[in-house]
Image: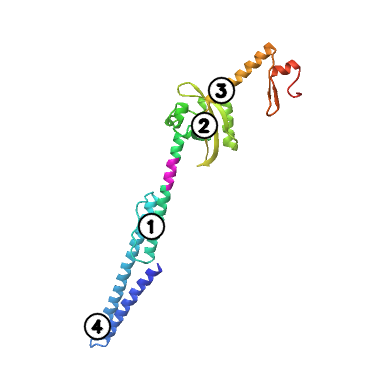
Amino acid sequence: MRRTFVKNALHTIILIFLLSVAFLAFAYSSVEPHFYIAPAFISAAVLIILVNIFSCRRITSRLRAIAEAAGKIASGDLAGGVPVNGSDEIASLAAAFNAMTANVKEKNAAIIASEARLRSLINNMPDCMWTADETGRVTSISPMVLNICGYTVHEFLSGLCPMFDNIHPDDIQTVRESYHALISDNSIFSLEYRFKKKDGNWVWLHNKAFMTYARAGHKYAEGIFSNVTSSKSAEIALLDSEARLREAQRIARLGSWDLNVVENTLHWSDETFRIFGLDHQSF
């Protein structure tokens, strides 16, 4: 702005100088002084005012162009710029503004690309990511929920599938207590429970929250759940098989043992301990 001010001041000084020369020329002429002194000063004043008005309007219009471009950027329109005219401070400001706009546009494009990659990853991963408020109402969930639970994203977000209402009666209390502890105390929320799908079948879910935060006076949690029905069924089947084996050994009074030669460890079945009259702690 200092360069623009100096330029305007120079224009004014030049005009005054020219008018002074004209005044002196008239002073040494044959025309009476009172016929030209007043008109000369009035003309000089008018010219000075017009020059400054023109200069101020030009400065104002250029600054208005920068302000309008800034308003467009604030609204998300990064396509425009401002013309760079001249080499004064306003031109330097316009050039700096255009460079800033280009930098913001480049970073915005990188953010959009990163978000697109993240959405693609979330939408194609086998697990389901979710966000819920302090009441357990789901506010965001990934499309994989359809494959796992049989409900669409719209059904979850519209409340057609309340999160807690579809949990198995034997698991609901544990889930509610764990979620309440997560929201109130940031306790660990990681558990397995049965969930009723839209078709009426039950699936085992492993649900784990990885963060909580507050926004607009409400508490939110984010996490991820996966379908662990296959592994859980195998685990249950193994436990049942071991229970049946223990019962069969008890009835037949037959014990079993195995020796791990590499680790030099010996394992006895429960019935083997009973046959020898020993308990696990004393052996």
Number of residues whose C-alpha sits closer than 10 Å to that of mark 3, classed few (under 14), some (14–19) or many (20 or more):
few
- 109 relative to 65, above or below: above
Mark 2 or mark 3, which has the lower sequence index?
A: 2
In front: 3, or 225?
225
- 208 relative to 34, above or below: above
- C-beta proximity under 8 Å, tags 4 and 2: no
Name the quadrant of the N terminus.
bottom left
Q: Give the residue at the far left of this rendering.
A: 30
Q: Quarter-wise, where is residue 188 in the image?
A: top right
The x and y percentages for residue 100 are 41, 56
Q: Quarter-wise, where is residue 55 in the image?
A: bottom left
Label 2 sits on residue? 225
Label 4 sits on residue? 35
Mark 4 or mark 2, which has the lower sequence index?
A: 4
Label 3 sits on residue? 234
- C-beta proximity under 8 Å, tags 1 and 4: no
For the record, the magenta segment spans: 110-117
Name the quadrant of the C terminus.
top right
Left or right: 49 in relation to 151: left
Amino acid type of the residue that numbered disc 4 sits on in the rendered structure: Phe
- 103 relative to 89, above or below: above
Q: How far apart are marks 2 and 3 (CA)?
A: 19 Å
Label 1 sits on residue? 98
Amino acid type of the residue that numbered disc 1 sits on in the rendered structure: Asn
Q: Quarter-wise, where is residue 22 in the image?
A: bottom left
* SS at mark 4 in the image: helix
